[in-house]
Amino acid sequence: MGERMAAMEARGALDVLIVGAGVNGTGLFRDLTAQGLDCLLVEKNDYAAGTSAAPSRLIHGGLKYLETGEFRLVAQSTLERNLLLANAPHYVKPLPTLIPIFSWTKGIGAALRTLFGSKSAPRNRGALLVKIGLMLYDFYGARHRVMPRHSTAGRAASLRGLPALTPDIVATGTYYDATVTHPERLILELVRDGLADSPRSAALNHVRLERADDGALTVRSLAGDAAATVRPKIVVNAAGPWIDEVNAILGEPSRMIGGTKGSHILLDHPDLLKELKGRMIYFEADDGRICLVFDYLGRALAGSTDIKAANPDTVRCEPDEVEYLLESLRKLLPKLRFSRDQIVYVYSGIRPLPASDAKDPGLITRDHATPVLEPVAGRPYPVYSLVGGKWTTFRGYAEEVADMLLKRLAVPRKVSTRGLPIGGGRGFPASGAEKDAWIAGLAQRTGLAPERIGELLARYGTTAQIVAAHVAAFPADAPLPDAPDYSAGEVDYVLRHEQVGALSDLAFRRTTLAVTGRLTARLVDALALQAGGTLGWDETRRADEVAAVRTRLKTFHGVDLA
Protein backbone atom coordinates (compact mmCIF):
# COMPACT_ATOMS: atom_id res chain seq x y z
CA MET A 1 0.00 0.00 0.00
CA GLY A 2 2.88 2.36 0.73
CA GLU A 3 4.04 2.33 -2.91
CA ARG A 4 0.53 3.06 -4.19
CA MET A 5 0.15 5.90 -1.67
CA ALA A 6 3.47 7.38 -2.75
CA ALA A 7 2.46 7.26 -6.41
CA MET A 8 -0.82 9.05 -5.68
CA GLU A 9 0.98 11.65 -3.54
CA ALA A 10 3.47 12.34 -6.33
CA ARG A 11 0.71 12.93 -8.88
CA GLY A 12 -1.57 14.91 -6.57
CA ALA A 13 -4.23 15.79 -9.14
CA LEU A 14 -6.74 13.21 -10.34
CA ASP A 15 -10.02 13.21 -12.21
CA VAL A 16 -12.35 11.48 -9.75
CA LEU A 17 -12.12 10.37 -6.13
CA ILE A 18 -14.73 7.73 -5.23
CA VAL A 19 -15.42 7.21 -1.53
CA GLY A 20 -16.94 3.81 -0.74
CA ALA A 21 -16.23 0.46 -2.37
CA GLY A 22 -19.61 -1.21 -2.36
CA VAL A 23 -21.27 -2.23 -5.58
CA ASN A 24 -22.22 1.33 -6.59
CA GLY A 25 -18.74 2.72 -5.98
CA THR A 26 -16.88 -0.14 -7.64
CA GLY A 27 -19.32 -0.23 -10.56
CA LEU A 28 -18.64 3.46 -11.18
CA PHE A 29 -14.88 2.93 -10.77
CA ARG A 30 -14.95 0.19 -13.43
CA ASP A 31 -16.97 2.39 -15.83
CA LEU A 32 -14.83 5.53 -15.42
CA THR A 33 -11.51 3.72 -15.71
CA ALA A 34 -12.76 2.07 -18.91
CA GLN A 35 -13.15 5.61 -20.31
CA GLY A 36 -9.51 6.39 -19.51
CA LEU A 37 -10.04 8.62 -16.46
CA ASP A 38 -7.58 8.70 -13.55
CA CYS A 39 -9.56 7.57 -10.52
CA LEU A 40 -8.89 6.81 -6.88
CA LEU A 41 -11.29 4.46 -5.06
CA VAL A 42 -11.03 4.49 -1.26
CA GLU A 43 -12.75 2.33 1.36
CA LYS A 44 -12.48 2.60 5.16
CA ASN A 45 -13.01 -1.14 5.61
CA ASP A 46 -12.70 -3.75 2.85
CA TYR A 47 -14.25 -3.98 -0.57
CA ALA A 48 -17.89 -5.10 -0.19
CA ALA A 49 -17.69 -5.01 3.60
CA GLY A 50 -20.85 -2.94 4.13
CA THR A 51 -24.35 -3.07 2.70
CA SER A 52 -23.20 -4.79 -0.49
CA ALA A 53 -22.20 -7.86 1.54
CA ALA A 54 -25.66 -8.19 3.11
CA PRO A 55 -28.11 -8.57 0.21
CA SER A 56 -30.63 -11.33 -0.39
CA ARG A 57 -28.07 -12.54 -2.97
CA LEU A 58 -30.56 -12.04 -5.76
CA ILE A 59 -30.25 -10.34 -9.12
CA HIS A 60 -33.89 -9.57 -9.76
CA GLY A 61 -36.17 -7.37 -11.78
CA GLY A 62 -38.21 -6.21 -8.81
CA LEU A 63 -41.58 -7.88 -9.25
CA LYS A 64 -42.96 -6.12 -6.17
CA TYR A 65 -42.07 -2.68 -7.59
CA LEU A 66 -44.96 -3.09 -10.03
CA GLU A 67 -47.30 -2.52 -7.06
CA THR A 68 -45.91 0.96 -6.42
CA GLY A 69 -45.98 1.91 -10.09
CA GLU A 70 -42.18 2.01 -10.46
CA PHE A 71 -42.35 0.67 -14.00
CA ARG A 72 -39.15 2.40 -15.11
CA LEU A 73 -37.26 0.71 -12.26
CA VAL A 74 -38.70 -2.69 -13.23
CA ALA A 75 -37.75 -2.13 -16.87
CA GLN A 76 -34.20 -1.17 -15.90
CA SER A 77 -33.88 -3.97 -13.35
CA THR A 78 -35.03 -6.74 -15.70
CA LEU A 79 -32.66 -5.48 -18.40
CA GLU A 80 -29.72 -5.30 -15.99
CA ARG A 81 -30.55 -8.79 -14.68
CA ASN A 82 -30.40 -10.14 -18.22
CA LEU A 83 -27.13 -8.33 -18.90
CA LEU A 84 -25.54 -9.70 -15.73
CA LEU A 85 -26.55 -13.22 -16.69
CA ALA A 86 -24.54 -12.68 -19.87
CA ASN A 87 -21.63 -10.63 -18.47
CA ALA A 88 -21.05 -12.48 -15.18
CA PRO A 89 -22.25 -16.04 -15.88
CA HIS A 90 -19.74 -17.47 -13.39
CA TYR A 91 -21.56 -15.79 -10.48
CA VAL A 92 -25.05 -14.86 -11.74
CA LYS A 93 -27.30 -17.87 -12.34
CA PRO A 94 -30.96 -18.31 -13.36
CA LEU A 95 -33.28 -18.97 -10.42
CA PRO A 96 -36.75 -20.46 -11.02
CA THR A 97 -39.07 -18.83 -8.50
CA LEU A 98 -42.39 -20.13 -7.18
CA ILE A 99 -45.13 -17.89 -5.75
CA PRO A 100 -47.74 -19.60 -3.52
CA ILE A 101 -51.21 -18.11 -4.12
CA PHE A 102 -53.90 -18.27 -1.43
CA SER A 103 -56.95 -16.75 -3.14
CA TRP A 104 -58.30 -16.02 -6.60
CA THR A 105 -59.28 -12.36 -6.51
CA LYS A 106 -58.13 -10.77 -3.24
CA GLY A 107 -55.82 -7.79 -3.13
CA ILE A 108 -56.92 -5.98 -6.29
CA GLY A 109 -58.42 -2.99 -4.48
CA ALA A 110 -55.43 -2.64 -2.14
CA ALA A 111 -53.04 -2.94 -5.08
CA LEU A 112 -54.83 -0.16 -6.93
CA ARG A 113 -54.67 2.08 -3.87
CA THR A 114 -50.92 1.43 -3.52
CA LEU A 115 -50.41 2.07 -7.23
CA PHE A 116 -52.02 5.49 -6.83
CA GLY A 117 -49.98 6.51 -3.79
CA SER A 118 -51.40 4.79 -0.69
CA LYS A 119 -48.80 4.46 2.09
CA SER A 120 -50.00 0.99 3.16
CA ALA A 121 -48.82 -2.20 1.46
CA PRO A 122 -51.27 -4.60 -0.22
CA ARG A 123 -51.88 -8.01 1.32
CA ASN A 124 -53.38 -11.32 0.21
CA ARG A 125 -52.34 -11.00 -3.42
CA GLY A 126 -54.72 -13.29 -5.30
CA ALA A 127 -54.25 -15.35 -8.45
CA LEU A 128 -55.65 -12.68 -10.78
CA LEU A 129 -53.33 -10.02 -9.36
CA VAL A 130 -50.31 -12.35 -9.49
CA LYS A 131 -51.12 -13.33 -13.09
CA ILE A 132 -51.31 -9.69 -14.18
CA GLY A 133 -48.03 -8.97 -12.38
CA LEU A 134 -46.23 -11.88 -14.01
CA MET A 135 -47.48 -10.90 -17.46
CA LEU A 136 -46.15 -7.37 -16.94
CA TYR A 137 -42.89 -8.82 -15.62
CA ASP A 138 -42.47 -10.90 -18.77
CA PHE A 139 -43.18 -7.80 -20.88
CA TYR A 140 -40.58 -5.67 -19.11
CA GLY A 141 -38.03 -8.50 -19.14
CA ALA A 142 -38.20 -8.99 -22.92
CA ARG A 143 -35.02 -7.02 -23.70
CA HIS A 144 -32.07 -9.41 -24.01
CA ARG A 145 -34.33 -12.19 -22.69
CA VAL A 146 -32.37 -15.28 -21.64
CA MET A 147 -34.91 -17.12 -19.45
CA PRO A 148 -38.39 -18.63 -19.95
CA ARG A 149 -41.67 -16.79 -19.45
CA HIS A 150 -43.86 -17.41 -16.42
CA SER A 151 -46.26 -20.32 -15.91
CA THR A 152 -49.04 -21.15 -13.44
CA ALA A 153 -50.23 -24.38 -11.85
CA GLY A 154 -53.29 -25.40 -9.89
CA ARG A 155 -53.36 -26.64 -6.32
CA ALA A 156 -53.02 -30.36 -7.03
CA ALA A 157 -50.11 -30.00 -9.46
CA SER A 158 -48.38 -27.54 -7.13
CA LEU A 159 -48.56 -29.90 -4.15
CA ARG A 160 -47.30 -32.80 -6.24
CA GLY A 161 -44.29 -30.71 -7.19
CA LEU A 162 -43.67 -29.41 -3.66
CA PRO A 163 -45.38 -31.74 -1.16
CA ALA A 164 -44.24 -29.81 1.94
CA LEU A 165 -46.07 -26.66 0.82
CA THR A 166 -49.08 -25.62 2.87
CA PRO A 167 -52.34 -27.11 1.52
CA ASP A 168 -54.02 -23.71 2.00
CA ILE A 169 -52.86 -22.62 -1.47
CA VAL A 170 -55.21 -22.43 -4.45
CA ALA A 171 -52.47 -22.22 -7.10
CA THR A 172 -48.84 -21.24 -7.71
CA GLY A 173 -47.05 -19.08 -10.24
CA THR A 174 -43.51 -19.71 -11.48
CA TYR A 175 -41.21 -17.16 -13.06
CA TYR A 176 -37.45 -16.66 -13.40
CA ASP A 177 -35.05 -14.28 -11.73
CA ALA A 178 -31.39 -14.86 -10.81
CA THR A 179 -29.06 -15.35 -7.87
CA VAL A 180 -25.52 -14.06 -7.35
CA THR A 181 -23.38 -16.74 -5.72
CA HIS A 182 -20.35 -14.63 -4.77
CA PRO A 183 -21.39 -10.95 -4.51
CA GLU A 184 -18.28 -9.96 -2.55
CA ARG A 185 -16.00 -11.49 -5.17
CA LEU A 186 -17.93 -9.86 -8.01
CA ILE A 187 -17.24 -6.49 -6.41
CA LEU A 188 -13.55 -7.35 -6.12
CA GLU A 189 -13.56 -8.22 -9.82
CA LEU A 190 -15.01 -4.79 -10.68
CA VAL A 191 -12.06 -3.25 -8.82
CA ARG A 192 -9.52 -5.45 -10.57
CA ASP A 193 -11.06 -4.82 -13.99
CA GLY A 194 -10.86 -1.08 -13.34
CA LEU A 195 -7.21 -1.26 -12.35
CA ALA A 196 -6.41 -3.32 -15.44
CA ASP A 197 -8.10 -0.73 -17.67
CA SER A 198 -6.34 2.25 -16.05
CA PRO A 199 -2.88 1.54 -14.60
CA ARG A 200 -2.66 5.17 -13.38
CA SER A 201 -5.75 4.65 -11.20
CA ALA A 202 -5.66 3.12 -7.73
CA ALA A 203 -7.96 1.37 -5.28
CA LEU A 204 -7.20 1.41 -1.57
CA ASN A 205 -9.01 -0.49 1.18
CA HIS A 206 -8.55 0.01 4.93
CA VAL A 207 -7.91 3.75 4.61
CA ARG A 208 -9.38 6.86 6.24
CA LEU A 209 -10.46 10.01 4.41
CA GLU A 210 -9.44 13.34 5.97
CA ARG A 211 -10.05 16.89 4.86
CA ALA A 212 -6.81 18.81 4.23
CA ASP A 213 -6.04 22.46 3.55
CA ASP A 214 -6.83 24.40 0.38
CA GLY A 215 -9.45 21.99 -0.92
CA ALA A 216 -7.20 18.93 -0.83
CA LEU A 217 -8.09 15.56 0.70
CA THR A 218 -5.81 13.16 2.53
CA VAL A 219 -6.13 9.39 2.44
CA ARG A 220 -4.42 7.68 5.37
CA SER A 221 -3.77 3.96 5.92
CA LEU A 222 -5.43 2.44 8.96
CA ALA A 223 -2.68 -0.16 9.24
CA GLY A 224 0.41 2.06 9.12
CA ASP A 225 1.81 5.53 8.52
CA ALA A 226 1.29 5.69 4.75
CA ALA A 227 -0.75 8.67 3.52
CA ALA A 228 -1.39 10.58 0.33
CA THR A 229 -2.86 14.04 -0.28
CA VAL A 230 -4.78 14.43 -3.53
CA ARG A 231 -6.69 17.14 -5.40
CA PRO A 232 -9.63 15.59 -7.23
CA LYS A 233 -11.61 17.43 -9.88
CA ILE A 234 -14.74 15.59 -8.71
CA VAL A 235 -15.62 13.62 -5.55
CA VAL A 236 -18.24 10.87 -5.62
CA ASN A 237 -19.74 9.86 -2.29
CA ALA A 238 -20.66 6.19 -2.72
CA ALA A 239 -20.58 5.36 1.00
CA GLY A 240 -24.09 3.89 1.11
CA PRO A 241 -25.59 4.23 4.59
CA TRP A 242 -22.50 6.25 5.59
CA ILE A 243 -23.16 8.96 2.95
CA ASP A 244 -24.14 11.60 5.50
CA GLU A 245 -21.07 10.79 7.59
CA VAL A 246 -18.77 11.26 4.59
CA ASN A 247 -20.47 14.50 3.59
CA ALA A 248 -19.76 15.78 7.11
CA ILE A 249 -16.06 14.98 6.62
CA LEU A 250 -16.20 17.00 3.40
CA GLY A 251 -17.69 19.91 5.34
CA GLU A 252 -21.22 19.44 4.04
CA PRO A 253 -23.51 17.99 6.73
CA SER A 254 -26.54 16.34 5.14
CA ARG A 255 -29.55 14.13 5.76
CA MET A 256 -29.89 12.15 2.57
CA ILE A 257 -30.20 8.60 3.95
CA GLY A 258 -33.12 7.01 5.79
CA GLY A 259 -32.25 3.35 5.58
CA THR A 260 -34.06 0.18 6.52
CA LYS A 261 -32.62 -3.01 7.95
CA GLY A 262 -32.84 -6.32 6.13
CA SER A 263 -31.94 -9.51 8.03
CA HIS A 264 -31.39 -13.05 6.74
CA ILE A 265 -30.75 -16.49 8.18
CA LEU A 266 -28.99 -19.52 6.70
CA LEU A 267 -30.03 -22.99 7.74
CA ASP A 268 -28.49 -26.43 7.48
CA HIS A 269 -31.69 -28.10 6.23
CA PRO A 270 -31.24 -30.93 3.68
CA ASP A 271 -34.95 -31.81 3.72
CA LEU A 272 -35.89 -28.26 2.70
CA LEU A 273 -33.29 -28.19 -0.08
CA LYS A 274 -34.68 -31.49 -1.37
CA GLU A 275 -38.15 -29.95 -1.56
CA LEU A 276 -36.93 -26.77 -3.23
CA LYS A 277 -35.15 -28.61 -6.08
CA GLY A 278 -33.18 -25.50 -7.00
CA ARG A 279 -36.21 -23.18 -6.84
CA MET A 280 -36.81 -20.11 -4.75
CA ILE A 281 -40.13 -19.65 -2.97
CA TYR A 282 -41.20 -15.99 -2.99
CA PHE A 283 -44.03 -15.73 -0.49
CA GLU A 284 -46.13 -13.38 1.57
CA ALA A 285 -45.77 -13.48 5.37
CA ASP A 286 -48.74 -12.87 7.66
CA ASP A 287 -48.01 -9.13 7.87
CA GLY A 288 -47.90 -8.72 4.10
CA ARG A 289 -44.10 -8.56 3.94
CA ILE A 290 -42.61 -10.45 0.97
CA CYS A 291 -40.16 -13.15 2.09
CA LEU A 292 -38.07 -15.71 0.26
CA VAL A 293 -36.18 -18.94 0.71
CA PHE A 294 -33.81 -20.72 -1.68
CA ASP A 295 -30.75 -22.96 -1.89
CA TYR A 296 -27.62 -20.84 -1.51
CA LEU A 297 -24.40 -22.86 -1.81
CA GLY A 298 -25.90 -25.83 0.02
CA ARG A 299 -27.64 -23.81 2.74
CA ALA A 300 -31.25 -22.61 2.89
CA LEU A 301 -31.17 -18.81 2.77
CA ALA A 302 -34.31 -17.17 4.16
CA GLY A 303 -35.12 -13.47 4.39
CA SER A 304 -35.78 -10.76 4.79
CA THR A 305 -37.07 -8.26 7.27
CA ASP A 306 -37.59 -4.57 6.45
CA ILE A 307 -37.27 -2.37 9.54
CA LYS A 308 -36.28 1.28 9.76
CA ALA A 309 -32.77 1.57 11.19
CA ALA A 310 -30.14 4.27 11.33
CA ASN A 311 -26.72 3.00 12.47
CA PRO A 312 -25.01 0.72 9.94
CA ASP A 313 -22.13 0.01 12.32
CA THR A 314 -24.30 -1.72 14.92
CA VAL A 315 -27.03 -3.32 12.84
CA ARG A 316 -27.51 -7.05 13.39
CA CYS A 317 -30.14 -9.74 13.07
CA GLU A 318 -32.08 -9.65 16.33
CA PRO A 319 -33.75 -12.69 18.02
CA ASP A 320 -37.25 -11.45 17.16
CA GLU A 321 -36.29 -11.24 13.48
CA VAL A 322 -34.98 -14.79 13.58
CA GLU A 323 -38.25 -15.99 15.09
CA TYR A 324 -40.24 -14.00 12.52
CA LEU A 325 -38.44 -15.73 9.65
CA LEU A 326 -38.67 -19.19 11.24
CA GLU A 327 -42.39 -18.79 11.95
CA SER A 328 -43.01 -17.62 8.38
CA LEU A 329 -41.29 -20.78 7.11
CA ARG A 330 -43.27 -23.00 9.50
CA LYS A 331 -46.56 -21.65 8.15
CA LEU A 332 -45.42 -21.91 4.54
CA LEU A 333 -44.02 -25.45 4.87
CA PRO A 334 -45.88 -27.07 7.80
CA LYS A 335 -44.56 -30.59 7.11
CA LEU A 336 -40.98 -29.55 7.78
CA ARG A 337 -39.31 -28.71 11.10
CA PHE A 338 -37.76 -25.27 11.59
CA SER A 339 -35.80 -24.37 14.72
CA ARG A 340 -32.88 -22.24 15.85
CA ASP A 341 -30.55 -25.22 16.09
CA GLN A 342 -30.61 -25.46 12.27
CA ILE A 343 -29.26 -21.93 11.83
CA VAL A 344 -25.58 -21.78 10.88
CA TYR A 345 -25.27 -18.04 10.14
CA VAL A 346 -27.28 -14.83 10.27
CA TYR A 347 -26.58 -11.42 8.80
CA SER A 348 -28.13 -8.00 8.49
CA GLY A 349 -27.44 -4.80 6.58
CA ILE A 350 -28.80 -1.31 6.06
CA ARG A 351 -30.41 -0.52 2.72
CA PRO A 352 -29.15 3.02 1.88
CA LEU A 353 -32.58 4.33 0.89
CA PRO A 354 -33.48 8.00 0.59
CA ALA A 355 -34.86 9.66 3.71
CA SER A 356 -38.63 9.07 3.77
CA ASP A 357 -41.68 9.41 6.00
CA ALA A 358 -43.40 6.31 4.58
CA LYS A 359 -45.15 4.28 7.31
CA ASP A 360 -44.33 0.98 5.61
CA PRO A 361 -40.57 0.61 4.94
CA GLY A 362 -41.40 -1.71 2.05
CA LEU A 363 -42.94 1.23 0.17
CA ILE A 364 -39.79 3.37 0.25
CA THR A 365 -38.46 3.51 -3.30
CA ARG A 366 -35.51 1.30 -4.26
CA ASP A 367 -34.73 3.66 -7.14
CA HIS A 368 -31.66 5.86 -7.09
CA ALA A 369 -30.89 9.57 -7.11
CA THR A 370 -27.69 11.60 -7.38
CA PRO A 371 -27.86 14.96 -5.57
CA VAL A 372 -24.93 17.25 -6.36
CA LEU A 373 -23.21 19.66 -3.98
CA GLU A 374 -21.63 22.28 -6.23
CA PRO A 375 -18.19 23.75 -5.40
CA VAL A 376 -17.96 26.46 -2.75
CA ALA A 377 -15.15 28.43 -1.16
CA GLY A 378 -12.72 26.01 0.46
CA ARG A 379 -14.13 23.05 -1.52
CA PRO A 380 -13.25 23.49 -5.20
CA TYR A 381 -14.73 20.14 -6.30
CA PRO A 382 -18.38 19.11 -6.65
CA VAL A 383 -19.65 16.17 -4.58
CA TYR A 384 -22.00 13.66 -6.22
CA SER A 385 -23.80 11.45 -3.67
CA LEU A 386 -25.09 8.07 -4.84
CA VAL A 387 -28.34 7.64 -2.90
CA GLY A 388 -30.39 4.45 -3.06
CA GLY A 389 -30.15 1.97 -5.87
CA LYS A 390 -30.06 -1.81 -5.71
CA TRP A 391 -27.56 -4.54 -6.42
CA THR A 392 -29.15 -5.52 -9.71
CA THR A 393 -28.97 -2.06 -11.29
CA PHE A 394 -25.43 -1.11 -10.31
CA ARG A 395 -24.12 -1.15 -13.89
CA GLY A 396 -26.92 0.99 -15.26
CA TYR A 397 -26.65 3.42 -12.36
CA ALA A 398 -22.87 3.62 -12.82
CA GLU A 399 -23.40 4.37 -16.50
CA GLU A 400 -25.82 7.21 -15.68
CA VAL A 401 -23.42 8.81 -13.20
CA ALA A 402 -20.37 8.24 -15.42
CA ASP A 403 -22.11 10.09 -18.24
CA MET A 404 -22.77 13.04 -15.88
CA LEU A 405 -19.10 13.16 -14.87
CA LEU A 406 -17.78 12.71 -18.41
CA LYS A 407 -19.94 15.61 -19.56
CA ARG A 408 -18.64 17.78 -16.73
CA LEU A 409 -15.05 16.90 -17.58
CA ALA A 410 -15.68 17.28 -21.35
CA VAL A 411 -14.44 13.74 -22.00
CA PRO A 412 -16.22 11.53 -24.56
CA ARG A 413 -17.35 8.02 -23.65
CA LYS A 414 -15.00 5.48 -25.23
CA VAL A 415 -16.78 2.23 -24.44
CA SER A 416 -20.15 1.00 -23.18
CA THR A 417 -20.20 -1.41 -20.27
CA ARG A 418 -23.51 -2.94 -21.44
CA GLY A 419 -21.79 -5.90 -23.11
CA LEU A 420 -18.56 -5.83 -21.10
CA PRO A 421 -17.81 -9.12 -19.30
CA ILE A 422 -16.84 -8.93 -15.64
CA GLY A 423 -13.72 -10.67 -14.31
CA GLY A 424 -13.93 -14.43 -14.61
CA GLY A 425 -17.02 -14.12 -16.80
CA ARG A 426 -14.76 -13.52 -19.81
CA GLY A 427 -14.75 -16.59 -22.00
CA PHE A 428 -16.87 -18.55 -19.52
CA PRO A 429 -18.02 -21.85 -21.09
CA ALA A 430 -21.58 -21.44 -22.37
CA SER A 431 -22.78 -25.05 -22.29
CA GLY A 432 -22.33 -28.15 -20.20
CA ALA A 433 -20.18 -29.75 -22.89
CA GLU A 434 -17.97 -26.65 -23.18
CA LYS A 435 -17.63 -26.55 -19.40
CA ASP A 436 -16.56 -30.21 -19.27
CA ALA A 437 -14.00 -29.63 -22.02
CA TRP A 438 -12.67 -26.50 -20.29
CA ILE A 439 -12.24 -28.37 -17.00
CA ALA A 440 -10.61 -31.38 -18.67
CA GLY A 441 -8.15 -29.17 -20.56
CA LEU A 442 -7.07 -27.21 -17.48
CA ALA A 443 -6.82 -30.39 -15.42
CA GLN A 444 -4.48 -31.86 -18.02
CA ARG A 445 -2.32 -28.72 -18.13
CA THR A 446 -1.99 -28.30 -14.36
CA GLY A 447 -2.18 -31.87 -13.09
CA LEU A 448 -5.02 -30.98 -10.71
CA ALA A 449 -8.03 -33.27 -10.47
CA PRO A 450 -11.04 -32.33 -12.65
CA GLU A 451 -13.18 -32.07 -9.50
CA ARG A 452 -10.77 -29.50 -8.08
CA ILE A 453 -10.79 -27.51 -11.32
CA GLY A 454 -14.59 -27.54 -11.19
CA GLU A 455 -14.50 -26.02 -7.70
CA LEU A 456 -12.12 -23.29 -8.84
CA LEU A 457 -14.20 -22.54 -11.94
CA ALA A 458 -17.32 -22.06 -9.79
CA ARG A 459 -15.37 -19.83 -7.41
CA TYR A 460 -13.31 -17.70 -9.82
CA GLY A 461 -14.79 -18.18 -13.29
CA THR A 462 -12.16 -18.34 -16.01
CA THR A 463 -9.67 -16.67 -13.65
CA ALA A 464 -9.44 -20.24 -12.34
CA GLN A 465 -6.74 -20.72 -14.99
CA ILE A 466 -4.43 -18.40 -13.05
CA VAL A 467 -5.49 -19.73 -9.64
CA ALA A 468 -5.03 -23.36 -10.71
CA ALA A 469 -1.53 -22.66 -12.02
CA HIS A 470 -0.66 -21.03 -8.69
CA VAL A 471 -2.08 -23.97 -6.74
CA ALA A 472 -0.24 -26.50 -8.90
CA ALA A 473 3.07 -24.70 -8.30
CA PHE A 474 2.50 -24.24 -4.56
CA PRO A 475 4.81 -26.51 -2.53
CA ALA A 476 3.07 -29.10 -0.36
CA ASP A 477 -0.45 -27.90 -1.17
CA ALA A 478 -2.96 -29.40 1.27
CA PRO A 479 -6.67 -29.07 2.07
CA LEU A 480 -7.65 -26.68 4.82
CA PRO A 481 -8.80 -28.21 8.11
CA ASP A 482 -12.63 -28.54 8.18
CA ALA A 483 -12.86 -27.11 4.64
CA PRO A 484 -11.27 -29.64 2.26
CA ASP A 485 -12.60 -27.90 -0.88
CA TYR A 486 -10.19 -25.03 -0.12
CA SER A 487 -6.44 -25.52 -0.04
CA ALA A 488 -3.33 -23.73 1.22
CA GLY A 489 -2.24 -22.97 -2.35
CA GLU A 490 -5.55 -21.31 -3.15
CA VAL A 491 -5.39 -19.22 0.03
CA ASP A 492 -1.82 -18.23 -0.86
CA TYR A 493 -3.03 -16.90 -4.21
CA VAL A 494 -5.76 -14.85 -2.52
CA LEU A 495 -3.35 -13.42 0.06
CA ARG A 496 -0.80 -12.38 -2.53
CA HIS A 497 -3.08 -11.00 -5.25
CA GLU A 498 -6.38 -9.80 -3.72
CA GLN A 499 -5.49 -6.96 -1.32
CA VAL A 500 -6.22 -8.84 1.87
CA GLY A 501 -5.63 -6.44 4.74
CA ALA A 502 -7.22 -8.35 7.61
CA LEU A 503 -8.18 -11.90 8.50
CA SER A 504 -11.84 -10.90 8.21
CA ASP A 505 -11.28 -10.01 4.53
CA LEU A 506 -10.24 -13.60 3.92
CA ALA A 507 -12.83 -15.31 6.10
CA PHE A 508 -15.90 -13.20 5.25
CA ARG A 509 -15.37 -11.92 1.70
CA ARG A 510 -12.62 -13.61 -0.34
CA THR A 511 -14.10 -17.00 0.60
CA THR A 512 -17.62 -18.23 1.42
CA LEU A 513 -16.47 -20.03 4.56
CA ALA A 514 -18.26 -17.65 6.94
CA VAL A 515 -21.58 -17.17 5.16
CA THR A 516 -22.07 -20.90 4.70
CA GLY A 517 -21.42 -21.50 8.39
CA ARG A 518 -18.24 -23.52 7.93
CA LEU A 519 -15.77 -21.57 10.04
CA THR A 520 -14.45 -23.51 13.02
CA ALA A 521 -11.91 -22.50 15.66
CA ARG A 522 -9.33 -24.77 14.05
CA LEU A 523 -9.97 -23.34 10.58
CA VAL A 524 -9.77 -19.71 11.76
CA ASP A 525 -6.46 -20.44 13.48
CA ALA A 526 -5.11 -22.11 10.33
CA LEU A 527 -6.14 -19.16 8.14
CA ALA A 528 -4.56 -16.73 10.60
CA LEU A 529 -1.30 -18.69 10.70
CA GLN A 530 -1.02 -18.72 6.92
CA ALA A 531 -2.11 -15.08 6.51
CA GLY A 532 0.33 -13.98 9.19
CA GLY A 533 3.20 -15.78 7.53
CA THR A 534 2.44 -14.30 4.11
CA LEU A 535 1.56 -10.76 5.22
CA GLY A 536 4.21 -10.42 7.92
CA TRP A 537 2.05 -10.37 11.05
CA ASP A 538 3.72 -10.95 14.39
CA GLU A 539 2.15 -13.16 17.05
CA THR A 540 0.29 -10.28 18.70
CA ARG A 541 -1.22 -9.11 15.40
CA ARG A 542 -2.23 -12.66 14.55
CA ALA A 543 -3.97 -13.11 17.89
CA ASP A 544 -5.77 -9.78 17.45
CA GLU A 545 -6.99 -10.82 13.99
CA VAL A 546 -8.35 -14.12 15.33
CA ALA A 547 -10.08 -12.33 18.19
CA ALA A 548 -11.66 -9.82 15.77
CA VAL A 549 -13.08 -12.60 13.60
CA ARG A 550 -14.43 -14.49 16.60
CA THR A 551 -16.03 -11.33 18.00
CA ARG A 552 -17.65 -10.46 14.68
CA LEU A 553 -19.01 -13.99 14.27
CA LYS A 554 -20.56 -13.94 17.73
CA THR A 555 -21.84 -10.36 17.75
CA PHE A 556 -23.21 -10.02 14.23
CA HIS A 557 -23.62 -13.52 12.81
CA GLY A 558 -24.87 -15.75 15.63
CA VAL A 559 -21.80 -18.02 15.58
CA ASP A 560 -19.86 -18.76 18.77
CA LEU A 561 -16.59 -20.63 18.20
CA ALA A 562 -15.77 -20.84 21.91
Image: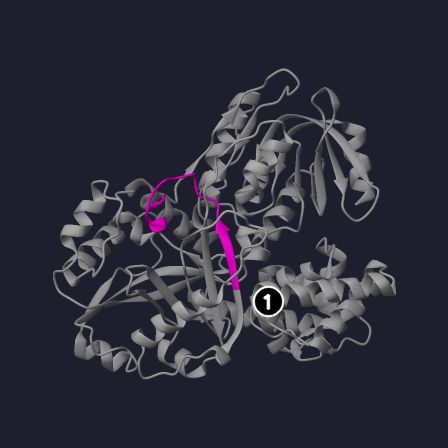
x 57%, y 27%: residue: 383
Residue 88 location (% of width, % of height): 50, 55
Q: Which residues are magenta?
A: 347-364
Q: Is residue 547 left or right of residue 254?
A: right
Front residue (pair 95, 107) = 107
Q: Quadrant of residue 480?
A: bottom right
State the residue position of label 1: 512
Position of the N terminus by quadrant: top right
Above or below, 194 relative to 382? below
Q: How is the image coloured?
A: one colour
Residue 225 visible somewhere in the drawing: yes
- Residue 36 appearing in the image: no
> Considering the numbered disc 1 on the image, is that residue within a helix, a strand or a loop?
loop
> x and y percent of residue 562 in the render?
68, 77
Quick check: is 348 in the magenta stretch?
yes
Q: Check disc 1 and give the amino acid type.
A: Thr
- Above or below, 186 relative to 552: above
